[in-house]
Structure formats: C-alpha cells, structure tokens
Amino acid sequence: MKCKRALSPSGLPGIDYALNPYGGCEHGCVYCYGPEVTHTDFREWRIVRVRSNIAERLAKEVPNIEGTVGIGTVTDPYQYAEKRFMLTSQCLEVLRSAGLRIHVHTKSDLILRDLDIISGMKGEVGITITTLDEKVSHITEPGAPLPKRRLEALKELTCAGVDTYALVGPVLMYLEGKEVEFVEAVASTGVRRMCVDRLNLRPLLSQRLERMGVRGSTSALEKIRHIAGDRGIEVTDVF
Ligand code: SF4
C-alpha cells in the first residue's frame, strides 16, 4: 500500500515522531497492544501491510522536522517482511542523512543487518525480552525470533557502542521463580538499562489473555527491578 505520510506526531515520552513501515505484525504476540491501539481485529493483526513508498515520503518530510523519530512504535520494524522489503533500512538511511535522532524498538536480531547504519547515528535501541524459555516464547510470541537470538543481538549492539536497553515487558507469570536467572542473562549482554512493563490490561486484551490462562506478574516485576538494581542496571518503567 502507499502511504500519504511517513511520520505521525507521537505522544510517547522522548519521541517526537512515529515511523512504522509496516501495518500489522507477523510476530503475533498474544499480549500485543497494537490491535487495540489501531482498532484491528487480533486475528487480522498478523496480516502485514507494506507501506512501500514510506522512504520516499520520509525524504520529503525530514527537512521540516527536528527531534527524535521512534521507529516501531506500533509494529515491529524488523519483522520478517523487512528482510524482503528493507523499508526500515531505507528509512534509516534517510534519517541518517538528515542527522535526526532515532529510537528503534524491536524483537528481532534482523536489526544487526543495519548495525553499520545505526552505529553511526544518534539515538537508542531497545530489544524486548520477556522470557528465556523457548517453549513460552513459542506460545506467547509465536512469530518472533527466540530469546537467545535477541540476547545475542542486544550484546552485539551494545558491544558496537550503540546506546541500548532491554525492554522487559510485559512481565508475565512465566518469570516467577526465574527472576535471578533472567536478570543475569540480560546483564550478560553488557546492557546498562532495563525498562520494565507492567501488563496494561485493555478490555479485549484482557479477554484474550484470560482465555489463554496468561497473566501478568507484579511480584516477578518487583523482584526483577531489585535484582537488576543490585547489579548496577538502571531500571525504569515503560511510559
Ligand atoms: S513484536 Fe511488538 S508489535 Fe509485533 S506482535 Fe509482538 S508486541 Fe505486537
């Protein structure tokens, strides 16, 4: 599909404009806020709409803006479609030429393909990790790369000097009793910041998770907050 505008103003903290090259997300996480935010039926959320002209539109818009562009505020900019269409990569090139600051958020190690571009830009990258358990990841994030690959990506980005953080969220019941092991795995990547997310239960999401028997865990979240703090990792809350 063709888009009329590449950027939309963002109300997210620290982000002035939102950029989402894809509509819908193949990762299909059961806890995704995207369907509700975009008024999309969850069953259709994994149908991806490719905004094929987004980089050209962006090139026309960047001369008139300043601030930080959030890439992947509603959908993952490195979902599998990106391997084929490379729109996120093209948009990064445009933003780099314009000298704009970026805030990229993903669950995919495909981001490493663009490490050369990102490492030369101002900004930060967040990688989401919600579990170390591959079975749990298959159930809750069925289309996303496994946690091990995300940890490796976080490590490689951090080692390359990119300002990184681990987005731990939402914190689900599966982390209960595994908090120490989890924080140690995240800390082993060298990341110095962690952003934790309490499950934000919107009505339809709440029904979906209830049907699946999935719930958030405040106790695991608080334990993770303390363990990470003790290891010198700065912990903040999402929004
Ligand atoms: S990766 Fe993000 S946008 Fe995609 S389905 Fe999962 S939570 Fe939603």
Image (cartoon, rainbow, N blue to C red):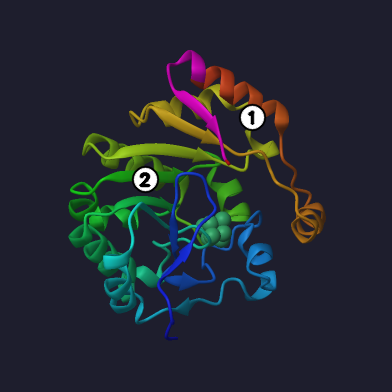
Q: Which mark is residue 221?
A: 1
Residue 231: in magenta span:
yes
x and y, in percent, of residue 68 in the image? 37, 51
Mark 1 residue's CB less than 8 Å from ligand 1: no
Which element type, helix, strand or loop, lies under badge 1?
A: helix
Q: Residue at x 37, y 81 (%)?
A: 52
**Quadrant of the rendered structure where residue 184 is?**
top left
Tell me the quadrant of the picture where the C terminus can be found: top right
Answer above or below: position of 210 versus 124. below
Nearest to N terminus: mark 1 or mark 2: 2
Mark 2 residue's CB less than 8 Å from ligand 1: no
Write down the region rendered in magenta: 229-238
Which element type, helix, strand or loop, lies under badge 2?
A: strand
For the view shown, which residue lies furthest in the front direction? 64
Q: Which mark is residue 20?
A: none
x and y, in percent, of residue 118 in the image? 24, 51
CA separation in Å, label 1 and label 2? 22 Å
Q: Residue at x 24, y 57 (%)?
A: 114
Residues marked 1 and 2 touching at CB (< 8 Å): no
**Quadrant of the rendered structure where residue 45 is?**
bottom right
In-front residue for pair 99/215: 99
| Other-residue count near label 1 (Cα within 10 Å), few / some / many at <14 / 14–19 / ≥20 | many
In-front residue for pair 18/49: 18
Kindly identify which residue carries mark 2: 125
Tell me the quadrant of the picture where the N terminus can be found: bottom left
